[in-house]
Image (tube, rainbow, N blue to C red):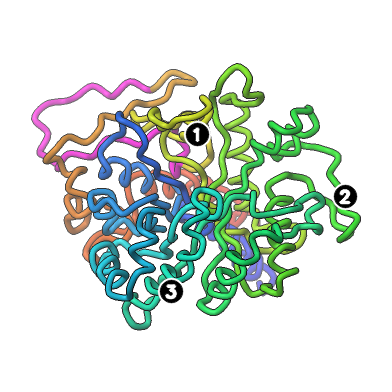
Amino acid sequence: MAGRGWVVLALLGVVQLLRLPLAAPQSFIGINYGDVADNLPPPSSTARLLQSTTISKVRLYGTDPAVVSAFAGTGISLLLGATNGDIANLASSPAAAAAWVAAHIPASSPAVSTVSVGNEVLFADASLASQLVPAMQNLYNALPPNSSIKVSTVHAMDVLASSDPPSSGAFKPELDTALDPVLAFLSKTGSPFLINPYPYFAYLSDPRPETLAFCLFQPNAGRPDAGSGLTYTNMFDAMVDAVRAALDAKGYKDVEIVVAETGWPHKGDPDEAGATAENARAFVSGLVSHLRSLAGTPRVPGKSVDTYIFAVYDEDLKPGKGSERYFGLFQTSLTEAYPTGLVRNGTAALGPAMAPAQAPTSVQPAPALPKPGQQPQVTPAQPGSAAVAGPSGLCTPGTATARGAAVACSRHNSAESSRTFSVPTIIAGLLFTALQMLI
């Protein structure tokens, strides 16, 4: 009997382990929410969309109050952006930084994990380099006492002088004057080094089939690093570990890396090799699977790096090459642009907001099931609807609602509930069969 008891406990443990990645958000998966477009859904609809996924954090490039407030009560944390244009003012005085914090940091919800002071400042505007750390320091000092908010700045991979092999990773010497104070600040405050690695651009510089497989997490021969004795099977890990090697070489082994942007365009100009929907799907789904495996990188195994995928939507007003406008994982109809593995209920779209329950007046026909391969469509939330009001508008005792809602409400949203029902039900059947065999 004791042996059977151990079997039962083991089976129950398997059930819990299988439920976890399906129903719970992953703390290490985030997404970038850009707004250089003229056709985007309301922020409230976007917040509701992201609640139907396993995404747990969102990076904003600014502090638009409508966007920030849309995430209140969702359980999704924000990485806010102080723009490059804010740097001079933040660096000018502690009072200016205090005013910025008072105006843009929510008092309670949504939670803010990090503030990025500028984006790729060292290359976007070299004149701001000397003001970057003073701005970061003033903003950090202006945060409330005992605040857990980190203050950092985002860098392009161009800060590296060498990245291949990864063990040779080193920062450009000409950036020492600007970068060394940044690294010292990050180490002192326990803040992360934010970096934008894009395997897509690595492929553009070397468009061979074997490079594409290496970039898309597809089977490949691997690339040995003679300097470390490690072997790399994907470009993402190689790029992250090159940054890790550069930080270690500077003596900052304590500074954590966060990937602030990475992605793959699903469309581009004729001369942009690899910018296809199939490659974008392969990259994003491969990245998500890799992060969920908790394998880490060859240099830092056993821990997935926090990663913000670029981006929620295409941005039709972005200048530059065509690919710049086609990094979106979701369409403005709130459906997936391609399967990503991020939607909780395993479908390609978010269901429309549920209307309040009413007594049935007549028998209604069952809704038609979508045809194979067809993506269910979503009706965007209308002004004044419960969806626009946010999760609290849907929250009544005993009903399903979004994460982080009032204690009186269930913490599972509708997508989460359907998923929690289907998979454990199947597993429960298997468990019951196993128990019958034991009896």
User: Which residue in the structure is indicated by mark 1?
Assistant: 327
Mark 1 vs mark 3: give the one in front. Answer: 3
Tag of residue 224: 2
| 1 and 2 marks in contact (CB < 8 Å) | no
- Which residue type does callout 1 highlight? Phe
Report the magenta stretch's main SS: loop
Measured along the vertical axis of the image, is residue 417 above or below residue 42? below
User: Which residue in the structure is indicated by mark 3?
Assistant: 137
Give the residue drawn at x 19%, y 55%: 392
Q: Secondary structure at mark 2?
A: strand
Give the residue drawn at x 70%, y 40%: 217
Counting residues from the start of the chain, the first of labels 1 and 2 encountered is: 2
Give the residue drawn at x 60%, y 59%: 305
Counting residues from the start of the chain, the first of labels 1 and 3 encountered is: 3
Q: Is residue 195 left or right of residue 148?
A: right
**What's the magenta region?**
343-369
